[in-house]
Image: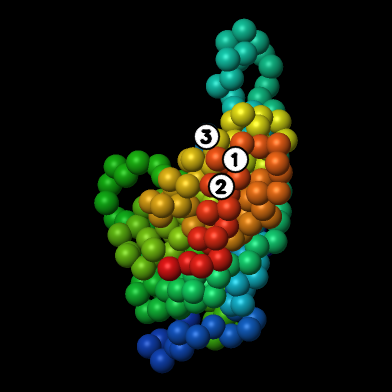
């Protein structure tokens, strides 16, 4: 299990200073987003983000689905253990600025996260921690009605979607080149619909497709279009 060292205990909620707090983060600030929900292809991941856009993404993902067609035949065979990986990331200045601004705002994580509504479906436990020179703020939730917290959540989940699709594309490039057309189509649709964000985080994966003359021209074209769009965001 990924253990994000910067996360505070769930009972420790340390309020940042009041309304006078600047929206601009200091160099030593760190924003952490942690997600966990069993049963998903990526059941746990953690972002550690610095104000300059640098950071890390740590994820635990299943290498083979437990619902494999072989499971009924071999019920005693345990599922493959999760694979853990950590990689550096660099987010755009715009996205980084928005994330820190929202986390530091008075209606952000200091205003409360968890909805008081009952019978909410389990969408995974999300934890946001902001460590700053002025103090720290922390909240953990399954579902939130706080629009600022929801915006932070959607952004990090959109980046996680891109990174996981990049991992899937990289695997297909190695072992299933015929599946690349479908994978690139899925990524393109998700980017268009705003479900996959910060495509530049997988630029190396996309560039490897552009440079490979052995893959379909349509795949290379889609990869090139995604690269161009990531270099010139709206």
Whether label 2 touches label 1, CB < 8 Å: yes
Image quadrant assignment for residue 46 = bottom right
The residue where tag 2 is placed is 221
106 up-or-down from 88: above or below: below
Image quarter in which the C terminus is found: bottom left
Residue drawn at (71%, 43%), measured in percent from left and top? 212
Cα distance between the residues tagged 2 and 1: 6 Å
Quarter assignment of residue 133 = bottom right
What's the mark number on residue 190? none
Which of pointers 3 and 1 indicates the residue nearer the eye?
1
Q: CA distance from mark 2 to mark 3?
A: 13 Å
Q: 91 or 126: nearer the eye?
A: 91
Q: Which residue is mark 1?
A: 217
- Residue count near mark 1 (Cα–Cα under 10 Å), binned few <14, some 14–19, many ≥20: some
Q: Secondary structure at mark 2?
A: helix
On the image, the x and y values in percent for residue 80 come to: 69, 28
* 123 w.r.t. 23: above or below: above
Residue 182: numbered disc: 3
Q: Residue furthest left?
A: 117
Spot occupied by residue 118 in the image (x, y as percentages of width and height): 28, 47
Residue 208 lies, with reference to residue 67, above or below; the image says below
Q: Residue at x 35, y 57 (%)?
A: 144
User: Mark 3: which secondary structure?
Assistant: helix
């Amino acid at each position: 299990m990924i253990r994000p060292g910067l996360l505070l205990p769930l009972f420790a909620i340390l309020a940042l200073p009041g309304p006078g707090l600047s929206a601009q983060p200091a160099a030593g600030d760190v924003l952490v987003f942690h997600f966990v929900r069993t049963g998903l292809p990526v059941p746990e991941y953690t972002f550690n983000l610095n104000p300059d856009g640098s950071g890390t993404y740590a994820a635990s993902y299943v290498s083979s689905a437990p619902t494999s067609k072989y499971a009924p035949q071999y019920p005693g065979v345990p599922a493959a253990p999760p694979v853990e990986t950590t990689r550096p990331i660099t987010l755009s200045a715009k996205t980084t600025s928005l994330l820190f601004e929202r986390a530091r705002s008075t209606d952000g994580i200091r205003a409360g996260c968890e909805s008081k509504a009952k019978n909410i479906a389990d969408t995974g436990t999300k934890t946001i921690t902001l460590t700053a020179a002025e103090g720290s703020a922390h909240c953990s939730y399954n579902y939130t009605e706080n629009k600022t917290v929801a915006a932070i959540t959607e952004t990090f989940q959109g980046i996680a979607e891109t990174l996981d699709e990049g991992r899937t594309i990289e695997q297909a490039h190695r072992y299933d080149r015929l599946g690349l057309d479908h994978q690139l189509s899925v990524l393109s649709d998700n980017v268009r619909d705003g479900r996959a964000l910060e495509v530049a985080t997988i630029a190396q994966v996309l560039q490897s497709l552009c440079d490979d003359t052995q893959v379909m021209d349509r795949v290379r074209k889609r990869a090139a279009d995604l690269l161009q769009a990531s270099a010139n965001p709206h």
